[in-house]
Amino acid sequence: MQSIDKFNFAGKKAFVRVDFNVPLDENFNITDDTRIRAALPTLKKILSDGGSVIIGSHLGRPKGVDAKFSLKHIIKHVSELLNVDVQFANDCIGEDAGVKAAALQPGEALLLENLRFYAEEEGKPRGLADDASDDVKKAAKKAVKESQKEFTKHLASYADAYVNDAFGTAHRAHASTALIADYFDTDHKMFGYLMEKEIKALNKVLEAPERPFTAILGGSKVSSKITIIENLLDKVDNLIIGGGMGFTFFKAQGGKIGDSLHEDEYMPLALEILEKAKQKGVNISLSVATVAGNSFSNDAEQKLCDTHNIPDGWEGMDASPASLENWKEIIMKSKTILWNGPVGVFEFPNFAHGTETIAQYVAEATEKGAYTLVGGGDSVAAINKFGLADKVSYVSTGGGAMLEAIEGKVLPGIAAVEGKPYK
């Protein structure tokens, strides 16, 4: 497979799929430019070679052309970071885009308008009435799929090479993230530097981890992590389960959990997971106590409760000191650590101690030589909030993509460039 480092872009135009889906405030100012900065090495490599870049991205989830989701809001900042006067096309496949792409000179850059302004990018029909018949839905889907081919072909026609550097959308089989790769031969499609780092980090953890390997899973619901847990049971030595998802396990074991978040329908599966772990020799570590609150608020009264005996009117909100001590012992003995999800309601400062402490443990383990991968929206937000992002081995930029990879799914954005099936 082609490598971006070995490819010479001199005199060539590259279509680079990036993930510039950045948060904007009410005045369209970027509040976090991490995703843009992450793509800079790839864009700069192409430009420094003497190539030109056509940048494609989405922003938000528009249901058609919507000015508030226009990428024109970020053009100035992208230009400043790239140190190039980036041109802007007011459409991604219109005449303006075609003319500007054709006229690009070496060292120049063009940012296309939001790819998701077109239904063809995602390949899903829009605007259907809720009561539309199955036949109407089927016909609409077929029509979009047929026009998607032309949409994809049009995007591909702008460039001589394709570079996918959008790990955040690698789990989507969209026109610009997967389908477009078919229009470039093996020598002219490749991953950008960010994608290479993401794939390397995942492989290091999931394919060849140094042991002991510990996964720390938190968050609110078991249902959102079931397939992750099941896949990890065949890979890890230790599985730490914290956060709201733990209370489904406690209730399933006959515990009294008060008003704590839980999912009754997943209690049988929780017990099954515990049994599977036992059979596979995987150590599952749950909270032994919780910092409970008498309301879901930062100012709630606090009480330390056994996780199997929480009074009515109280709910688990944060990991207890005893639980953290148990987890510290496991984490410090680990050589590979994967962390996904907070172990408390870290958005509330008064209940953020557990998650901050886990972040500190992971950072400390990294300093001692462990390989640590942090991923998933809340985990990344937490590690950044506590100023420890540079103290772990790698922080993934793709929440959904990373989670699907951990589940064991094939990511279309990766498979397409590698020339592998993904459906």
Image (spheres, helix red, strand yellow):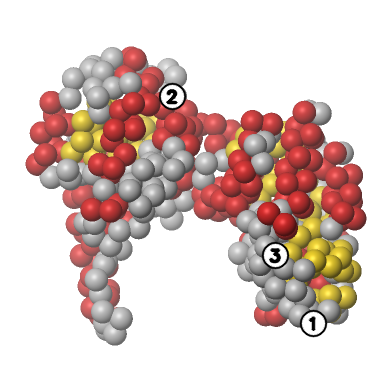
Contact, mark 3 vs mark 2 (Cβ under 8 Å): no
Q: In the picture shown, does residue 257 fall above or below 86?
A: below
Residue at horizontal 77%, vertical 46%?
357
Residue kind at label 1, given as amino acid type: Asp
Indicate the secondary structure of the residue bearing disc 1: loop
Q: In the picture shown, does residue 265 fall above or below 23?
A: below
Percent from the top left, x then y, of residue 318?
76, 60
Indicate the secondary structure of the residue bearing disc 2: helix
Residue kind at label 3, given as amino acid type: Asp
Tag 1 residue: 312
Question: What is the spatial separation of the Cα atoms under label 2 and label 1, in whole angstroms?
Answer: 54 Å
Indicate the secondary structure of the residue bearing disc 3: loop
Quick check: 334 left or right of 25? right
Q: Comparing marks 3 and 2, which lies closer to the viewer? A: 3
Tag 3 residue: 299
Percent from the top left, x then y, of residue 73?
28, 42
Percent from the top left, x then y, of residue 378?
60, 52
Q: Is residue 83 visible?
A: yes
Quick check: 335 left or right of 187? right
On the rendered image, what quadrant is the N terminus found in? top left
Q: Which of pointers 1 and 3 lies earlier in the amino acid sequence?
A: 3
Residue at horizontal 28%, vertical 62%?
63
Q: Comparing marks 2 and 1, which lies closer to the viewer? A: 1
Q: Which of pointers 2 and 1 lies earlier in the amino acid sequence?
A: 2
Residue at horizontal 75%, vertical 32%?
366
Residue at horizontal 24%, vertical 56%?
66
Question: What is the spatial separation of the Cα atoms under label 3 and label 2, in whole angstroms?
Answer: 44 Å
Which mark is on residue 41?
A: 2
Quadrant of residue 148 in the image?
Answer: bottom left
Crowd tier of the residue under label 1, counting other residues whose Cα lies within 10 Å: few below 14, some 14–19, many 20 or above: few
Q: Is residue 420 visible?
A: no
